[in-house]
Amino acid sequence: MSIKVYCIGDLMLDIVARIPTTPRDLHLGNDTRTIISTHGGGAGGNVASWLAVLGNDVTMVGRIGNDAAGSAITAEFDALGISYGEIVKDDLHTGVVICLVDPSGERTMLADNGANAGLTISDLPSLQNVDAIYLTGYAPLAPLSRQGVLEMVGAINAQHIPIVFDPATVGGMQGVPVEEILSWCALMDTVIMNEEEAIYLSGLSDLEAALNFFVENTPRAIIKRGSAGAIGLERGGQIISIAARTTAVVDTTGAGDAFAAGFIDAFTGGRDFSYAMERATAVAGHCVAIVGARGRVGTQI
């Protein structure tokens, strides 16, 4: 069943360099031969792409510049059938991420937020017939976007539309008080984190205790554990543990975004929490088997 989803957040052009060693062992000040490719990126755009690959009606709420990087992003959205409205801003430049991927598939990212900063409530289209919202933490974490994004959240909550929230990396959360980020989590229907993020926000190293901490304020929480799979909890339920899908890891970039898309697709489509976590893990497994963070036209899941 197709669902209508808005994805609110960052849009980036990813420059992916598959380096032959770890970043710390690069020949600084000299040349290193590598394989470089460009891909659409940004958590919001990545989730939108995977949701579109899964056959849903998707609208991207974000900002890009009127430049070559922005044109590459809109061309990719056009191919996938993703709507994006008036996201091009003539006086800004598109956000860019340089992503170094080592032989194990681990990635190190250098980011320029570009046009992503400055979202306002006016960027939110009509919420009529919208089934779910995905919100990346990078949007409210940006000081220039925070007020506008929280106003969006208020409008969405007033329409009783569920929001799936990924609070972003621990590095991205630095500079904003944990208590403030937790107050955002309390406004969401589902919070999806990785282990490091869950420990940082809850202050608890025991992941099951962390899940119980989060569902005191939000109906459900999920902690992604990479190759160890994921665990999740709905308020009033039992902790669910899902194993990761066995696959050859090529590039872990965007795996968490693919996970979120798989969860939204299944859970909003009427499947139960356990099945939705299984689906999320399966979509993430497809993501780590390719270079880049996004599904493409013809991607089969």
Image (cartoon, rainbow, N blue to C red):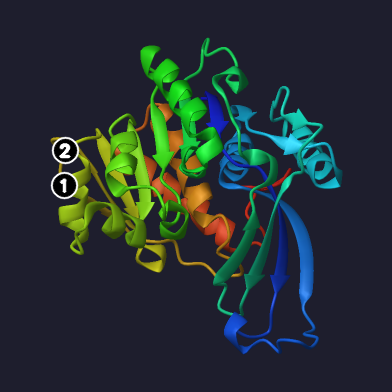
Q: Reply above or below: 269 against 97.
A: above
What secondary structure is marked by label 1? helix
Image disc number at residue 296: none
124 relative position to 63: left or right: left
Q: Nearer the viewer, residue 184 or 134?
A: 184
Question: Does residue 301 appear in the picture of this structure?
Answer: no
In the image, residue 97 lies at what x, y percent?
Answer: 67, 57
Q: Quadrant of residue 60?
A: top right
Question: Disc 2, disc 1: CB below 8 Å?
Answer: yes
Q: Reply above or below: 271 against 291.
A: above
Question: Hey, what amino acid is under mark 1?
Answer: Asn
Instruction: Look at mark 2 in the image and give the residue it sits on.
Output: 216
Instruction: Look at mark 1 in the image and give the residue it sits on.
Output: 212
71 relative position to 167: left or right: right
In the image, residue 263 lies at what x, y percent?
Answer: 43, 40
What secondary structure is marked by label 2? loop
In the image, residue 285 lies at what x, y percent?
Answer: 51, 58
Q: Residue at the spot x=51%, y=25% of the render?
A: 1
